[in-house]
Image (spheres, grey):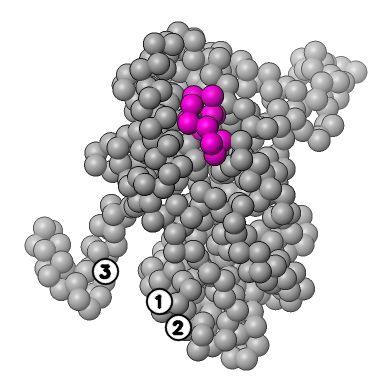
Amino acid sequence: MLRYDIGYLDGFITNGEFDAVKEEVAAASALLRAGTGKGNDYLGWRDLPAVFDKEEYERIKDAGRRIREQSGILLVIGIGGSYLGARAVLELLRGEMHNELGGLRVYFTGNSLSPSDIEELLRICDTADVSINVISKSGTTTEPAVAFRIFRNYLIKRYGEEESRKRIYATTDKEKGTLRKLSDEQGYETFVIPDDVGGRFSVLTPVGLLPLAAAGIDTDALIAGAEAMRQAVNEDDTLANPCNRYAAVRNILLRTGKSVEILSCFEPRFRMMGEWYKQLFGESEGKDHKGIYPSTCVFTSDLHSMGQYCQDGSRILFETLVRFTGSDSELKVNAEEVDFDGLNYLAGKKIHDINQVASDATMSAHTEGGVPCSVIECEKIDEFNTGELIYFFERACAVSGYVLDVNPFNQNGVEAYKRNMFALLDKPGYEEDRERLLNKR
């Protein structure tokens, strides 16, 4: 079971500070459990690992098998929560170079407006048969809508109207929206984005499960891990609950001037999980001029760049390390007859064990440099432990947001750039905004 270790925080947080915040955290946790807090119409994620739609889930697994049979490439088209969770889990479990290792290649697009990225992916599509999973509740979000228009046209030109319909899978609203309308008209197989689950909390819905099932991920174990964590924390409003303890630490440190959190990990394959965490906490807490700024580092590589700032820079940050204590790898450092690089002292040691020592050494150095550090420990990198970690972060994020007294489940600030972009691109209905923006130039 996942552990949250605060041993490195000695000297940074006192027992008195924990005592001072425990009632606030308990109240926030109880509010979440009762479903009476701000944004309570978006709490579907809370019990999702126990009450998901079993019939739709079987369709998801069946569609995943068919995608693997019909195609060598799956394009997942979405932005924000519509792709980050699936990509994060896939790369954590399979590695950043998973597409080079055989089997179904999964590419994520529709998360930018870069023409070079789209053109590069179009060339890649010519190397194998292609299926598409387009993910959008409305169907009108600009980035994925542009990508879907381009790649749908690509499928039609390559396979024809009828065959292309069999290669498009839409994850969208149950009843409304342009993507739902198009899917019904064209006969695309569809899966539902639940109304009560926001995008950044949606990785365990069809949004994340279909791409992961297609990639051959054991989604049963992923859900089981999330359910194990849900059961472990669901009824506990105290600081013994690791989600509540993490929320407490974050808010105590924020009140002492630590406004930036670095989520670090010594596994490069964790990189996209860091991106998912940034959206989860950034969109949930960053409102009403409040919140902790979420950032990430992948060590040891970033120790040779951002490590300098962590060690000696402005003392506005704290660090949370995600550590995987176990590994199936037996890879060791070999001995050399001539110790040309001076590494024979490491001969026979597992790379995993050396990496663990590096993480211990880093946490000690950072705490000695004035950075409060804590550790989230997972047993190993696999589906079950990943499910635990996902639910841990989701729950902790909701509690932390309630302690901050914000609505953790809305994101009104995201709409500002969209409105300006629509105006400057001459979208009908945005004429006044366009005039306002042009007058600023």
Residue 243 is one of the magenta-drawn residues: yes
Q: Residue at x 26, y 69 (%)?
A: 422
Could you tell me if the residues under marks 2 and 1 are in contact, i.e. CB atoms within 8 Å? yes
Q: Is residue 308 visible?
A: no
Q: Eyeballing the image, is 152 above or below 396?
A: below
Residue position marked by numbered label 3 in the rendering:
422
Alpha carbon separation for disc pair 2 and 3: 22 Å
Locate residue 280: give its quadrant.
Answer: top left
Identity of the residue furthest to the left in this view: 439
Locate residue 390: give its quadrant.
Answer: top right
**Identity, as a three-letter code, of the amino acid under mark 1:** Gly
Q: Tell me the magenta residue range.
A: 233-245
Q: With 198 as the anchor, is 218 left or right in this view?
A: right
Quadrant for the N terminus, please: top right
Q: Secondary structure at mark 1?
A: loop
Residue position marked by numbered label 2 in the rendering:
181
